[in-house]
Image (spheres, rainbow, N blue to C red):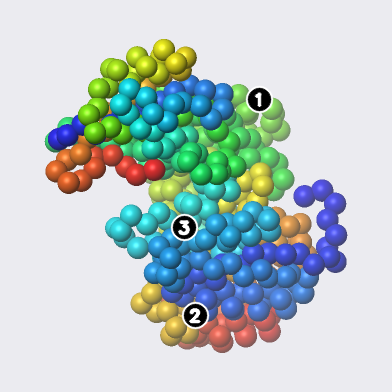
Amino acid sequence: MGSVNLKAMQKIALIRGDGIGPEISDAVTEILNTACPQLEWVPVEAGLGLIEKIGKGITDEGIKTLAETRISLKGPTTTPVGGGHRSINVTIRKTLDLFVNVRPVRSIPGVETPFKNVDMVIVRENIEDTYGGVEHRQSEDLAQCLRFITRSGSIRCHRYAFEMARREKRKRVTCVHKANIMKITDGLWLDAFREVAKGYPDIQADDIIVDNCCMQMVSKPQQFDVLVLPNLFGDIVSDLGAGLVGGLGVASGANIGTSGAIFEPVHGSAPDIAGKGLANPTAMLFSAISMLRHLARIDEANRVERALLATLGNPATRTKDLGGTLGTQDFKRALIANL
Amino acid sequence: MKLVGMDVFVVSSGLPKVPEKIAGFELKAISNRGTKVWPGATPSIQLTDSFGCRYLSPNPQPLALLEALEKAGFTWVHVEKLHDFGDKPGYSAL
């Protein structure tokens, strides 16, 4: 980030989202305001309410605000199935060219899973692959989807993975692919990885076929440090990673590009529990902690993270989904008390 | 299945200035890796050198379109015919 004036006010676009989005967003912003008073929230409307009103999930003006603010925190938004609505997340990623999705996969105290001491980061290419959504029916029987992989897009994604590894003092980056079958597209992806790796002799670089990667992740996930994947494999494997450490309810993510970044929980808008005060803000708070680190506000990030881990580590202050008794508001109060 | 148009992928170092009307076809959209870059404002994405040009026609003559584009100086590298199946398009929207 270069030199940053940590005493200056920092504008952050806030998309509260829909479903449980507003209640967890309110909890998270209150926690962050307590830990870091320099944050100034710029509200941006997006989600189901807008789709129902104007037929699309975010306005051009909203996109402009995200582009100007450069840093955004986003609650979950609903994409209705069918009806031709493009996902708000996909719209934002493509419009702002947020070319990597970063998903930390780390064991969390108090969140019981079959695996301990997992600590990896999954870096997913965010623009290309089959996510261009260019599909054709060739005949009555056959449909196809075009898979776009470019050398330029692969190189910038791999470079991000290595730079992040160096910044976070990680030791190894593993390229995940299916180049044994998709020899041209994933061959290009893998060649680009090997080329970029030459520029980072201090970091171990290797590769693994995606099916073996999945098997290894559910056998011995502790072996991985940083994984870098093309879009579709990354989508699937990052959810597998979330499952290793407690599921989507605690999984955070960030979409990052050269001109901005959006931090958001991975889970959906859970309309079935919306407005009931039951939602767990943990995933969005982990996303907010990543955002503070991205802004070089390391002390505040560490302070919020310590408070969050202490709150999750105490059975008396967990939310119901993690075996506790607390609702959103009481969890937030317990966490602020731990700050 | 009924032929209604073509996606013609053209190599270009920037947004290609392909004709909006050519060989009985009308240009509806240009995409780059699936992201629409024309009409309207081009999003600030990193562009690759292959652009998908979506041409529709009430009476499509595919070879005439390709010949006309070549004559106009464009290098096409990939083509998909667009068909309707009953009342549903057999191709994704841009």
Residue sitting at 76 percent across and 61 percent down? A297
Q: Can residue A147 be seen in this view?
A: no
Q: Nearer the viewer, residue A327 or A67?
A: A67
Q: Are marks 2 and 1 on the same chain?
A: yes
For the view shown, which residue lies furthest in the top direction?
B71
Residue B55, placed above or below residue A266? above
Amino acid bearing label 2: Thr
Q: In which quarter of the image is the C terminus of chain A?
A: bottom right
Q: In which quarter of the image is residue A34?
A: bottom right
Q: Earlier in the sequence, mark 3 or mark 1?
A: 3
The chain under label 3 reads A
- Is the residue marked by circle 3 packed among few (<14), some (14-19), or many (20+) residues within 10 Å? many
Label ID, residue A198: 1
Q: What element carries label 2?
A: loop
Amino acid bearing label 3: Ile
Residue, disc 3: A88
Which of labels 2 and 3 is toward the front?
Answer: 3
Q: Which of marks 2 and 1 is nearer the N terminus?
A: 1
Q: Are marks 2 and 3 on the same chain?
A: yes
Q: Earlier in the sequence, mark 2 or mark 3?
A: 3
Give how far apart the Cα atoms at labels 3 and 1 are. Answer: 37 Å
Question: Residue A96's x, y, as percent?
Answer: 58, 48
Question: Residue A165's x, y, as percent?
Answer: 66, 43
Residue B17, placed above or below residue A129? above
Q: Are marks 2 and 1 in contact (CB under 8 Å)?
A: no
Give how far apart the Cα atoms at labels 2 and 1 are. Answer: 46 Å
Residue sitting at 50 percent across and 39 percent down? B37
Label ID, residue A319: 2
The chain under label 1 reads A
